[in-house]
Each structure stands twice: as C-alpha cells, then as structure tokens.
C-alpha cells in the first residue's frame, strides 16, 4: 500500500485542472492488446496483471480524508470484465462515496453498458477511452492513416450508444 502519510505535507499544492485532489490507485497493470500507436502494452510485454479487488478496496477505504476523488491509473481498467464487476460490487458494499475515473477501451464500454451503469452507481464519473484511434483514422487523409498505425487490433468503429450518457459521463479526447 502506498504510504500516503509521507505526502501529507505536500498534498495541499497538488490538484488536477479542476482543483480536485485526486488519489491515483492501481487496479491492474499493462494491456494485452497490441494497438500499434500505443506504447502501454510494450512496457509489460503485453501482459495484463490484475490486483485483487479486495486489496484495491482496502486501499480506497484507507485514503486520507483530504482526498476528493480517485483516478484508477491503469492502462486499461476494464479489460477483465469479471474482475471489474467484482471490484464494483466491493466498492458498493464498502460504502465508499468517492467519485472515480479510469481509462478503458471504447469497445468494452459499448459492449458492457450494464457494467458501466453499475459502476456509475458506485461512483464512476468519467471514462477516458484509450483506443479512439479508430475514430480518428476514419476522418484522416490516406497518407496520415499510414503514418499513424492503421491497424489497432480492435479498432472501435461504433460510437457509444446514446443511452450510455445516462450511465456515465463519457469524456472523449479527440486528439488521442
Ligand atoms: S491503446 Fe489501449 S487497448 Fe490499445 S494497447 Fe494501448 S492501452 Fe491497450
């Protein structure tokens, strides 16, 4: 577990662009996909390691009182959907009231609206889609498509269903 007591004296000056004090928590490391515009999977050689949801919730429960929000600093938080469900249920059972955000593949979000809806009920505020290259490539000139990795393994070509906006606030950064 991170020794957050060591950073107590510095935390006052650290916040995100909205002035919110975040805690970075890991639920997993790496990514098993091979999108060729992305460096994340190379760092762990394509492995995807998950941390036990019990341990994640234990860390979340022990966060200092001055923490206002959690950012799951994984490469791809929702890759293991079963794991994500277990984590969500434990967060709910724990009574943690903090909002949280995460990176996830857009196609996972689209395929699992029930999970996203449930996560929202547990505190999910924002999903940062990590693989929107597929969207961007659709709009680029042929020469640009060649320059930036034309073959992500599973390019997400479908937008999130309109109903998803009811389930989670989906933040799309179009310059990915
Ligand atoms: S873009 Fe996302 S899904 Fe693709 S390799 Fe990187 S982290 Fe994995």
Image: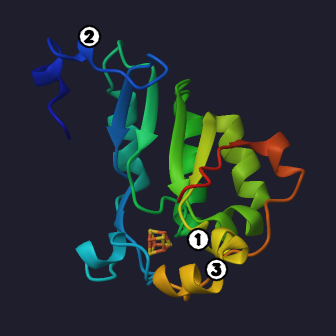
Q: Quadrant of residue 132?
A: bottom right
Which label number is shown at residue 155? 3
Q: Classify mark 3: helix, strand or loop.
A: loop
112 on left or right of 30:
right
Where does label 2 land, which residue? 12
Q: Residue at x 59, y 65 (%)?
A: 105
Q: Nearer the viewer, residue 111 or 175?
A: 175
| In the depicted structure, whether residue 95 falls above or below residue 75 | above
Q: Is mark 1 within 8 Å of ligand 1?
A: yes
Q: Quadrant of residue 1?
A: top left
Alpha carbon separation for disc pair 2 and 3: 40 Å
Q: Residue at x 38, y 46 (%)?
A: 56
| In the depicted structure, whether residue 48 falls above or below residue 113 | below
Q: Classify mark 2: helix, strand or loop.
A: helix
Alpha carbon separation for disc pair 3 and 1: 7 Å
Which label number is shown at residue 133? 1
Query: Is there CB contact under 8 Å for labels 2 and 1?
Result: no
Query: Is there CB contact under 8 Å for labels 3 and 1?
Result: yes
């Amino acid at each position: 577990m991170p020794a957050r007591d060591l950073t107590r004296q510095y935390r006052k000056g650290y916040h995100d662009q909205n002035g919110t004090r975040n805690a970075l928590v890991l639920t997993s490391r790496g990514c098993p996909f091979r999108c060729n515009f992305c460096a994340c999977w190379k760092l762990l050689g394509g492995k995807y390691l998950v941390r036990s949801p019990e341990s994640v919730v234990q860390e979340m429960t022990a966060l200092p009182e001055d923490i206002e929000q959690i950012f799951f600093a994984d490469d791809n938080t929702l890759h293991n959907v079963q794991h994500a469900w277990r984590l969500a249920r434990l967060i709910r059972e724990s009574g943690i009231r903090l909002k949280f955000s995460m990176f996830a593949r857009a196609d996972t979000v689209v395929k699992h609206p029930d999970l996203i809806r449930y996560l929202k009920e547990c505190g999910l505020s924002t999903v940062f889609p990590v693989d929107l290259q597929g969207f961007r490539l659709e709009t680029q000139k042929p020469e640009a498509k060649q320059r930036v990795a034309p073959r992500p393994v599973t390019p997400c070509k479908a937008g999130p269903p309109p109903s998803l906006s009811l389930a989670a606030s989906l933040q799309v950064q179009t310059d990915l």
